[in-house]
Amino acid sequence: MEAVTVDFKPILDLTDEQFYQLCRSNPDVKFERTATGALIIMPPTGGETGKSNSACNALLWLWNEQNKLGIVFDSSTCFKLPNGSDRSPDASWIKLARWDTLQPEEKEKFPPICPDFVLELLSPSDTLKVTQKKMQEYQENGVRLGWLINRKLRQVEIYRIGQEVEILNNPSSLSGEDILPGFVLNLEKIW
């Protein structure tokens, strides 16, 4: 099952608060929202994707716990991006100084901030083209480093602010570069 996009715009324009309440009222459904207001209903992942996603989050969290440079978020976290979309990366990280600029109520709901780092793990229910557009949207909204990991092809697309996408075939690891200094993701745990 692929994600389903429903455009209610002709009959209904959800406010941010209404979208938040819709998500809270339907905790078993994962929603995202495009910048134009269309709702995206995301299917659950399968076991292999969930296992790999959990490994990515755990490794990122362990690195951050040692370095204390920011905050790590899982795939359940929805961010209000500057372009108006509401997105939930599979894993993300925000530099602590940026996170601390938010008000407590902003942190509690869907934080109005674009992560510094995002990771999307392509699952069988995702299409590459749609996920690439999502990565470009992150990049356009301020993500400094993004990884799109395609386990099936053993390929990684690296998105950096102001640069062309770099494609790596069958890499053994990924470096967090200067965004996540010292972080190395061992892809043998992901493939």
Image: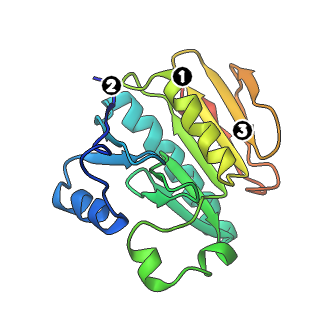
Residue lying furthest top: 153
Amino acid type, mark 1: Lys
The disc at residue 2 is 2
Q: Which residue has dot 1 on it?
A: 129
Looking at the image, tell me whether mark 1 or mark 3 is earlier in sequence order: 1
Q: Residue furthest front?
A: 10
Query: What residue sits right under mark 3 in the picture?
Result: 159
Residue at position x 73%, y 56% in the image? 180
Considering only vertical position in the picture, is 8 above or below 181? above
What distance separates the C-alpha of mark 2 from that of mark 1? 12 Å
Q: Amino acid at mark 2?
A: Glu
Q: Is residue 20 above or below residue 50?
A: below
Query: In the depicted view, which residue is nearer to us: 92 or 164?
Result: 164
Compare marks 2 and 3 and give the one earlier in the sequence. 2
Which one is nearer the viewer's eye here, 155 or 101? Answer: 101
Q: In front: mark 1 or mark 3?
A: 1
Is disc 1 surrounded by few (<14), some (14 to 19) or many (20+) residues within 10 Å? few
Label 2: state its secondary structure: loop
In three-dimensional space, the C-alpha distance between marks 1 and 3, rounded to whole angstroms, equals: 15 Å
Q: Is residue 32 above or below residue 52?
A: below
In what element is the residue under mark 3? strand
Proximity of marks 1 and 3: CB atoms separated by less than 8 Å: no
The quarter of the displayed image where residue 116 is located: bottom right
Q: Residues within 10 Å of mark 3 (few under 14, many from 20)?
A: many
Q: Is residue 154 left or right of residue 33?
A: right
Q: Quadrant of residue 181?
A: bottom right
